[in-house]
Amino acid sequence: MPQCLTANPTSLEVSTLQEGDSAYIVRVNEAAPSLTVIFVPPVLRDATGAPISTGSVTGVSVNPSGPVCGTNQIVFTTAGLNIEYTVTVTYTEPPRSETVGPPLDTPTKSPKFKPLTSCPPSAP
């Protein structure tokens, strides 16, 4: 089960986004009427964990419309409470050392987000 997002802004790594039936809960209320989710591109690391190269997030879209999308982020507000949104994040994988030129594909991930005024008891 995806977590309940409360920090503004919240950064999520594209490579770890969970897709499926369960939605990330986004807590927005009178005290915190908006929350920005920033999508972090995948990073290629060496055996020690040091970054070698970084991909990029090339676009964010949402269905149904409502939240405002940027190139690598989306902003949820209290105007969209209790609506489950499917967010499509388009990104590129980090270039590998043996390849030259742009990546051949631009994969997408489509996690779901649902703004609520509080985190459900079951969400960590």
Image: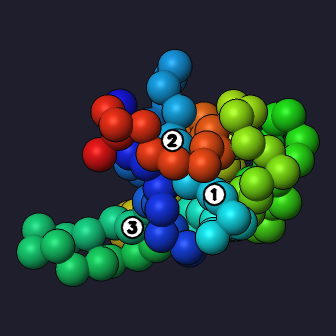
Left or right, 86 with respect to 12, comes to right
Residue at 85% across, 34% down: 64
- Farthest residue in the front direction? 30
Residue in the foreground of this view, choosing between 37 and 5? 5
> Residue 84: horizontal and vertical position, in percent?
69, 31
Residue 55 can be seen, yes or no: no
Residue at 69% across, 64% down: 30
Residue in the foreground of this view, choosing between 28 and 47? 28
Q: Which residue is mark 2?
A: 24
**Amino acid marked by disc 3:** Val
Q: Is residue 95 above or below residue 105?
A: below
- The mark lying in front, picked from 1 and 2, is 1
- Whole-number angstrom distance, CA of label 3 to CA of label 2: 22 Å
- Whole-number angstrom distance, CA of label 1 to CA of label 2: 13 Å
What crowding class fits label 1: few (fewer than 14 Cα within 10 Å), some (14-19), or many (20 or more)? many
> Element under label 1?
loop
Q: Which residue is mark 1?
A: 28
**Amino acid marked by disc 1:** Val
Tag 1 or tag 3, which sits nearer the N-term?
Answer: 1
> Element under label 2?
strand
> Residue 47: horizontal and vertical position, in percent?
11, 68
Q: Which residue is mark 3?
A: 43
Left or right, 72 with respect to 44, comes to right
> Residue 99: horizontal and vertical position, in percent?
47, 62
| Contact flag, marks 3 and 2 (Cβ < 8 Å) | no
Residue at 51% across, 41% down: 24
**Amino acid marked by disc 2:** Tyr
